[in-house]
Image: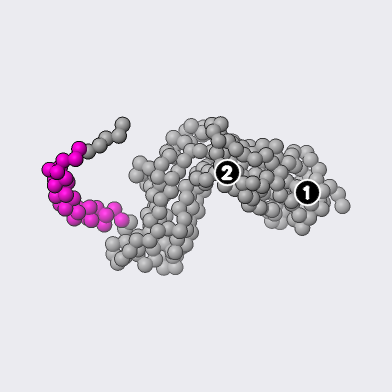
Amino acid sequence: MKHTRSKNNGTKKHMRLLAILLAPVVSLILVVAAPEGWAKGGHGIEELDEAEVYIEWNSTDTDYGIQFFWDSVGFTRMTVKNTMGKKVLDVKTSKNVKAQGLTEGFFESVEPPASELSMEEFLDRFPEGEYKFRGISIEKDLLVGETEFTHILPAPPENLSPKEGDVVRHTGFTASFDPVTMDTDGEELEIVLYVVVVEKEDDDPILQTFTVILPPSKTSVDVPAQFLEPDTVYKLEVIAQEESGNRTIAETGPFTTDSE
């Protein structure tokens, strides 16, 4: 229900007086609520370049994780609070790293399988709403950022090709999949990008991956001969990302390249 305030001049006068009386208190609260160290020489407030909290769901492995990312001019401390005001992440630098400062932060949670943590339990653990970033810059200014965290997840990409057991040309082949148009609840949604990853199964001596970011209008990509080897086993991963940043992964393979 929407509540409205009656237009009463007396009420307005009391509200103006209350605002004047509360102003010093609000200022005090802002100083106390700022991260430790900001008030000891900081002189400004600066917005983070990026602040993101999103879900990554691997529909093939049936596991879930939450990820945090931010980018700034340089920070020595960063905290993240959830929609209920509870601190969920606190990063603090020290000594030579504090003197140098950091510009980015990325953290990925453990991803237990659904047999250990159901989707319902995972979503209860991380409620929807605005998540607030607060940090301290190298110059001791306050760094601020907000992001809207949602539980909207793209449905898994389907009809991935190549699929398990296929033999493809080592001189190049096309990886493809069906477009994603729905979320996991069957509601329409817009995908902002796809990520296609072809990965060599044998990571000796190094893990080799071919990664391409596609616009939502594209659902195929040519994998070049320069990346491929004959008689080699690979797998395909497709990631669908919607506008809040939440991502759903589907995988297929292993498949093999042909001989020379």
Tell me, yes or no, whether the highlighted magenta stretch contains residue 178: no
- Distance between mark 2 and mark 1 Cα atoms: 25 Å
Task: Describe the colour scheme in one phrase.
Answer: one colour
Residue furthest to the right: 260
Left or right of 131 on screen, residue 175: right
Q: Nearer the viewer, residue 97 or 44?
A: 44
Q: Nearer the viewer, residue 225 or 180?
A: 180
Left or right of 145 on screen, residue 66: right
The answer to whether any part of residue 251 appears in the image is yes
Query: Mark 1: few, some, or many residues within 10 Å (few <14, many ≥20)?
Result: some
Amino acid found under the numbered disc labelled 2 = Ile
Magenta-drawn segment: 6-34
Residue at coordinates 41% horizontally, 68% vertically from top-left?
99
Name which quarter of the figure residue 206 lies in: bottom right
Q: Earlier in the sequence, mark 2 or mark 1?
A: 1
Residue at coordinates 39% horizontally, 66% vertically from top-left?
138
Could you tell me if the residues under marks 2 and 1 are in contact, i.e. CB atoms within 8 Å? no
Q: Which mark is residue 191?
A: 2
Query: Mark 2: few, some, or many residues within 10 Å (few <14, many ≥20)?
Result: many
Identify the residue under disc 1. Answer: 173
Amino acid found under the numbered disc labelled 1 = Phe
Q: Position of residue 2 (x, y in %)?
A: 30, 34
Q: Position of residue 243 (x, y in %)?
A: 52, 45
- Secondary structure under badge 2? strand
Name which quarter of the figure residue 142 lies in: bottom left
Looking at the image, residue 165 lies above or below residue 211 = above
Q: Which mark is residue 227?
A: none
